[in-house]
Image (tube, rainbow, N blue to C red):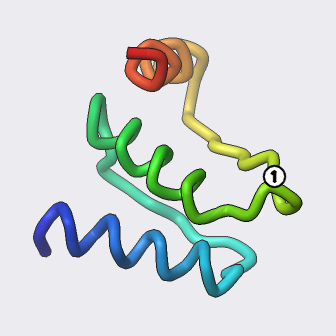
């Protein structure tokens, strides 16, 4: 599946208000791009958006990528 198609599928889940879904294999800048795409689809009234990662090291790395 292409990157763009994957992001479109993620956006469709967000628009459909899928209560819970899991994404695997997102690393580095692609994870940040996926989060940005999801946030763009979430109405302001439905925020905040919660992102879970396995540990603090990965959380810090993801935060750096998002802020970049």
Q: Could you classify mark 1 by the number of other residues whose Cα lies within 10 Å: few (under 14), some (14-19), or many (20 or more)?
A: few
User: How far across and how far down the image is residue 18, in percent?
Assistant: 67, 81
Relative placement, left or right, of 39 versus 11 is right
Q: Name the residue: 17% across, 61% down.
A: 3
Relative placement, left or right, of 4 versus 49 is left
| Number of callouts | 1
Q: Name the residue: 33% across, 65% down.
A: 7
Give the residue at the far left of this rendering: 2
User: How far across and how far down the image is residue 59, in percent?
Assistant: 55, 22
Q: Is residue 23 above or below residue 9?
A: above
Instruction: Assign the C terminus to one quadrant of the image.
Output: top left
**Residue highlighted by disc 1:** 47
Q: Name the residue: 63% across, 43% down.
A: 51
Q: Name the residue: 40% across, 51% down.
A: 34
Q: Mark 1: which secondary structure?
A: loop
Q: Is residue 39 above or below residue 7?
A: above
Give 19 or 46, whichever is nearer the viewer: 46
- When asked about the image quadrant of residue 24, the answer is bottom left
User: How far across and how far down the image is residue 13, in percent?
Assistant: 54, 79
Give the residue at the far bottom of this rendering: 16
Relative placement, left or right, of 50 versus 10 is right
- When asked about the image quadrant of residue 15, the answer is bottom right
Q: Is residue 33 above or below residue 23?
A: above
Relative placement, left or right, of 27 versus 39 is left
Instruction: Assign the N terminus to one quadrant of the image.
Output: bottom left
- When asked about the image quadrant of residue 31, the answer is top left
């Amino acid at each position: 599946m292409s990157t763009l198609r994957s992001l479109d599928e993620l956006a469709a889940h967000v628009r459909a208000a899928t209560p819970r879904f899991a994404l695997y294999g997102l690393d580095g800048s692609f994870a940040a791009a996926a989060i940005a795409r999801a946030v763009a689809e979430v109405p302001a009234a439905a925020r905040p958006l919660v992102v879970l990662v396995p540990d603090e090291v990965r959380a810090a790395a993801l935060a750096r990528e998002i802020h970049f």
